[in-house]
Image (cartoon, helix red, strand yellow):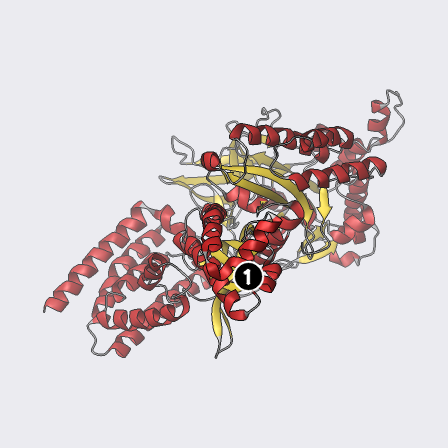
């Protein structure tokens, strides 16, 4: 009886918490609910898009054949003329021509002060072409204050009717409109904005069909094209007490949320619609039947033009295809939406499901309870999947599932089984890798796949001992070398573990470690950099202890003769996304990290020798740091095996610890040096090599400076570029070796 009462009270409590979460804090759960709906899209798979919608694509091929974007407006005009000649029913332009065409002969003559009215005006040419073709131009709204004062307002031929409009509008109100130049905007029959507003996780799941700007309601490009195709003048907005309920164009009823956003029922990943290269249309190399009578959207899939979006199907999805999906949904009435009555269904589900779990927990036998639990989960997920994909009805899936899981995990038998199995596994993997605090956190986690491979942001750390070859030669025997390495590795490893890091492996005299895995750690970049600086600060104490140890007398004598410390290290730190998890074979595996982030961290460490630095970090790590440090910009480089340039920074010390600095200079001296040095760097970056050279030589001549080699590097570069001026200089240096 006590067991039943205990479960009953727990059931009532969890049901109440779940209901409060659903009604009062929907924004907390919505990101996770979105992910579940995304998964349902992926489970459904690809669906062929409407074949009457065609995308004329400014793709890489077009850029190669017709030149880099933006093209001169006469080319765009020629493209539109060819589309008209092919018989396009309507053309939506998912591009805004916000600035005059400076390549136009008219503009060139004007710039030269030559008055000639007979030269070609490409802007006028495009405007006149748009006026003679079934083209609807696009523009974009700036949703927040971008520092530019609002100027012109868009024009639309649509008549907007609002029914049951409440006192306060729920529509999105942008700050200003970024329009086409008047020669183009004014010649168009109509226009529409092509904004796509992503959710907080960056995924575009819905599109606002109308926005209110300056007290006037404007339609999106896709909605305006639908209105014109249906030969309708009116767009009707129907409100209820919560906001917009639906939008109607003729006999087409479009369900929306309160802010007039339509959920997009994506057909699939990119290229669900027919794509035709703009170059082929320009050169008339296509079958006219591909365009005749079709809805044409002119946009781009080229990565360099930055019109790529993230959708449930694809992380690099052409923005123009989002509009194609919207039009497809409206034309074919294949909507997904959350109707008003769906809220009532969600509430009933949230209240009923916990009592079903209550009954399951009273079943005799752990296996029977577990099977019933799985069946109930599958029933809810399957039912919600069917309603979303077959009936277009979206219900809340996450909160009922969370309520079920929370209750079921209260079952002592299942808890005991899962907890003990997980503890034994994790103990074997992490007993010597992480601190006891991290170990306890992992063991207390209820996540079953905590060791499974996943993609996450980490900070990677590589350190390497200097003069290791000489040390090993002087020690002369393996046992002595092992004792020496243990004396060095022990304090270094303790610093890493104390800061929350995970030691991945020892590679000879090198240490590889990372932060923010397997468990998330706040400010993991600061933890890694702090550990690196603590190691550098601890070298004096370590070297003093090693010199007093008679086992290492030969090494101490060698170091004293050369004026070097017994142990010195170089450290590289990088922050970025990596694959972390259990990797290996069935018989032998390890929890580790792989990816370009790790490779770059290793390169940063090896470049310490080149830049005469003891602690190199990437620009990615610098951006992630929250604490105060003393930075020196080292270089903008492409390292071996990479094509994208990376900033390399040297960290001298904690800013607050300068009184116990790693370098024999005062805070004022270091600040003065770095100020002059960074002034020289800025001159170098802008190609002013002679001025930069003078500054580099000035600082290089100072007696107290903290990095002698870096000045020689830049002096040599400046002298080279002065003698051999580059045609175009972007400040990037290419490293062709690893270090």
Locate the C terminus and report the quarter of the image it occupies.
Answer: bottom right
Q: Is residue 336 visible?
A: no
Q: Is residue 12 above or below residue 730?
A: below
Q: Is residue 352 above or below residue 632?
A: below
- Residue at left offset 81%, top offset 43%: 78
Q: Secondary structure at mark 1?
A: loop
- Residue at left offset 46%, top offset 34%: 659
User: Callout 1: few (<14), some (14-19), or many (20+) C-alpha neighbours within 10 Å?
Assistant: some
In this rendering, the count of numbered labels is 1
- Residue at left offset 76%, top offset 33%: 687
Residue 215 in the figure: left or right of residue 81: left
Q: Is residue 146 above or below residue 204?
A: above
Viewer-closest of 277 and 575: 575
Q: Which residue is mark 1?
A: 509
Give how far across and how far down residue 298 sits, in percent: 70, 47
Viewer-closest of 307 and 386: 307
Viewer-closest of 570 and 524: 570
Give how far across and how far down residue 52 sits, in percent: 66, 56
Locate the N terminus and report the quarter of the image it occupies.
Answer: bottom left
Residue 97 in the figure: left or right of residue 462: right
Residue 418 in the figure: left or right of residue 209: left
Give how far across and how far down residue 97 sits, in percent: 70, 35
Give how far across and how far down residue 46 sits, in percent: 57, 64
Q: Is residue 369 visible?
A: yes
**Residue lying farthest left?**
1
């Amino acid at each position: 009886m006590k067991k039943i009462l205990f479960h009953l009270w727990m059931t009532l409590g969890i049901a109440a918490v779940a209901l409060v979460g659903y009604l009062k804090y929907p924004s907390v759960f919505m990101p996770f609910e979105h992910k579940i709906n995304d998964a349902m899209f992926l489970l459904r798979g690809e669906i062929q898009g409407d074949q009457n919608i065609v995308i004329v694509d400014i793709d890489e091929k077009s850029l190669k054949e017709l030149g880099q974007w933006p093209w001169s407006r006469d080319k765009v005009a020629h493209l539109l003329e060819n589309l008209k000649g092919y018989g396009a029913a309507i053309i939506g332009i998912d591009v805004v021509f916000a600035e005059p065409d400076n390549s136009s002969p008219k503009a060139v003559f004007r710039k030269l002060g030559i008055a000639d009215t007979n030269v070609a005006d490409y802007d006028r040419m495009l405007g006149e072409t748009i006026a003679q073709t079934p083209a609807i131009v696009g523009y974009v709204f700036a949703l927040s204050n971008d520092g530019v004062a609002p100027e012109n307002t868009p024009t639309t031929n649509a008549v907007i009717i609002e029914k049951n409009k409440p006192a306060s509008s729920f529509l999105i109100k942008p700050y200003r409109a970024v329009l086409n130049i008047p020669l183009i905007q004014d010649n168009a029959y109509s226009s529409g904005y092509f904004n796509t507003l992503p959710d907080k996780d960056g995924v575009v799941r819905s599109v606002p069909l109308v926005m209110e700007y300056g007290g006037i309601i404007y339609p999106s490009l896709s909605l305006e094209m639908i209105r014109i195709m249906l030969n309708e003048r009116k767009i009707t907005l129907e409100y209820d007490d919560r906001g917009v309920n639906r939008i109607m164009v003729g006999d087409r009823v479009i369900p929306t949320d309160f802010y007039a956003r339509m959920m997009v029922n994506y057909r699939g990943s990119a290229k669900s619609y027919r794509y035709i290269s703009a170059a082929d249309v320009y050169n008339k190399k296509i079958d006219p039947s591909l365009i005749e009578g079709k809805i044409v959207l002119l946009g781009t899939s080229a990565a360099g033009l930055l019109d790529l979006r993230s959708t449930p199907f694809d992380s690099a999805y052409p923005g123009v295809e989002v509009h194609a999906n919207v039009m497809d949904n409206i034309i074919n009435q294949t909507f997904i939406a959350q109707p008003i009555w769906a809220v009532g269904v969600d509430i009933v589900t949230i209240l009923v499901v916990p009592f079903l779990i209550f009954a399951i927990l009273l079943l005799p036998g752990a296996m029977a309870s577990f099977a019933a639990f799985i069946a109930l989960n599958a029933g809810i997920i399957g039912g919600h999947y069917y309603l979303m994909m077959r009936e277009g009805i979206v219900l809340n899936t996450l909160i009922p599932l969370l309520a079920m899981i929370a209750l079921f995990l209260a079952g002592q038998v299942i808890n005991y089984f899962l907890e003990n199995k997980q503890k034994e596994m994790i103990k074997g993997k992490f007993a010597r890798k992480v601190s006891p605090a991290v170990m306890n956190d992992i063991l207390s986690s209820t996540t079953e796949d905590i060791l499974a491979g996943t993609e996450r942001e980490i900070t990677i750390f590589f350190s390497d001992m200097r003069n290791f070859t000489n040390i090993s030669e002087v020690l002369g025997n393996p046992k002595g070398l092992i004792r020496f390495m243990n004396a060095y590795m022990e304090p270094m490893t303790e610093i890493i573990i104390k800061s929350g890091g995970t030691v991945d492996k020892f590679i000879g005299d090198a240490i590889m470690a990372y932060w923010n895995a397997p468990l998330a750690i706040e400010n993991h970049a600061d933890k890694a950099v702090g550990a690196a600086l603590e190691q550098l600060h601890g070298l004096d104490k370590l070297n003093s202890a090693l010199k007093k140890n008679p086992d290492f007398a030969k090494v101490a004598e060698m170091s004293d003769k050369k004026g070097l410390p017994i142990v010195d290290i170089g450290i590289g730190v990088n922050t970025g996304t990596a694959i972390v998890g259990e990797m290996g074979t069935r018989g032998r595996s390890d929890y580790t990290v792989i990816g370009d982030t790790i490779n770059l961290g290793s390169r940063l460490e090896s470049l310490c020798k080149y830049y005469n630095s003891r602690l190199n970090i990437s620009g990615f790590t610098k951006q992630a740091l929250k604490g105060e440090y003393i930075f020196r910009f080292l270089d903008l480089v492409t390292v071996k095996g990479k094509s994208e340039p990376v900033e390399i920074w040297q960290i001298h010390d904690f800013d607050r610890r300068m009184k116990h600095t790693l370098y024999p200079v005062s805070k004022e001296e270091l600040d003065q040096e770095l100020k002059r040095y960074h002034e020289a760097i800025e001159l170098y970056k802008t190609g002013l090599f002679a001025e930069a050279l003078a500054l580099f030589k000035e600082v290089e001549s100072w007696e107290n400076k903290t990095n002698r080699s870096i000045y020689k590097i830049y002096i040599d570069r400046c002298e080279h570029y002065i003698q051999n001026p580059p045609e175009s200089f972007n400040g990037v240096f290419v490293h062709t070796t690893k270090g």
